[in-house]
Image (spheres, rainbow, N blue to C red):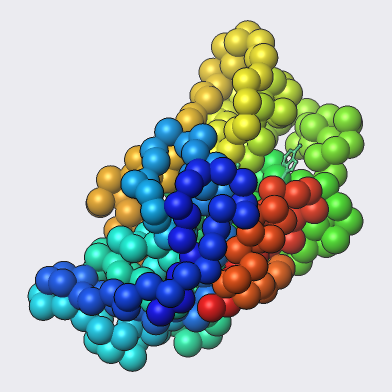
Amino acid sequence: MKAIRVHAFGKPEVMELKEMPDPQPDTGHIVVRIHAIGINPVDTYIRSGLYPVKPDLPYTPGMDAAGFVEAVGKGVKNFRPGNRVYVAGTISGSYAEKALCAESQVHHLPDRVSFAQGAGVGVPYGAAYRAIFQRAKAVPGEVVLVHGASGGVGIASVQLARAAGMRVIGTAGTEKGRILVTEHGAHHVFDHNDPDCLEKVRLLTDGKGVDVIIEILANVNLGKDLGILARGGRVVIVGSRGPVEIDPRNAMSRDAAILGMVLFNASECEMNSIHAALGAGLENGALAPVIGRELSLSEAARAHHEIMAPGAYGKIVLIP
Ligand code: NAP
């Protein structure tokens, strides 16, 4: 099979398309024939060598994908060859024609969801669900600001919060992105590059503030976020690319909470809960990943450049 291999950490061009032996399933393992691969920012951090957790070299990048089950090992209970699935994590890496997975990393993909969409579920929808429900513990009727709503996690957050009966405010940096965010369920949308963006959000809530902020770029926004939280508000840090200064008094005066979050910290039980909820949402149509761009597997380096550029529009996927 063809697979992307990384022999040394570095710039996107360290990713090379190579011929590799087909994976074989051991006990409890599943081989998935991949039809689409989801690109996530974390794939770029790992490839660069700057992420705290480093794989042994050489390795095949990627966590998310979708396709058909090709083979199952002994003891696999819930899947058989031919099943449509999405994978959230793999043993062998997802930037390939086939991936070896543990059964717990494989989830059924409803017929209404394309493989490209299925490749956009694992990390972004998992993170969005964990941020909204497991960390912020948001409930129907609350006001949720998705601060950075046009990308993978943002669109997922908007769809999840809207489906759960929250009032959803989203932000995006381009007009195209703002239209997308509105189409996917935000009641109101603003431009996060507008210096008055958060004041406009505050006014929209009659000065009360928002209950929950899903923060995609905390190093830019956290200080200002604290000033527009309602009493008892929670800001969940999903993404951050550097340090930021805050005024703790803004949190004190509101009994507010700043909650960190990394999806990989979720327990097995929490992960089961996440994928049970996502499966239900995909099945009933409440959740529909947006695919902004499809590239071929050989264009992995281009995909890594593009995911770090401004002007997000849903997900970038690779097609093997
Ligand atoms: P993505 O698809 O590339 O989207 C990036 C988003 O950031 C876009 O919506 C972009 O909007 C927005 N953005 C740009 N400037 C912003 C600003 N000043 N304020 C607010 N938002 C801004 O990436 P993703 O997959 O959604 O991931 C987003 C971040 O979350 C990344 O840093 C990623 O590493 C992190 N993440 C964390 C976890 C976790 O477990 N904690 C899991 C998944 C992802 P425009 O392009 O429209 O400006």
- Residue 319 in view (yes/no): yes
Quadrant of the image occupied by residue 86:
bottom left
The location of residue 191, given as percent across then percent down, is 84, 44
Residue drawn at (56%, 53%) of the image: 14
Q: Which of 85 and 204 is in front in this view?
A: 85
The location of residue 306, given as percent across then percent down, is 72, 56
Q: Which of 129 and 119 is in front in this view?
A: 119
Say above or below: 20 vs 188.
below
Residue drawn at (31%, 85%) of the image: 70
Left or right placement of residue 224 versus residue 239 in this view? right
Residue drawn at (29%, 67%) of the image: 101
Quadrant of the image occupied by residue 181:
bottom right
In the rendered image, the quadrant that contains the N terminus is bottom left
Q: Nearer the viewer, residue 124 or 92?
A: 92
Say above or below: 29 vs 256.
below
Residue drawn at (33%, 91%) of the image: 82
Say above or below: 30 vs 38.
below
Left or right placement of residue 199 versus residue 166 in this view? right
Left or right placement of residue 140 versus residue 91 in this view? right
Image label count: 0
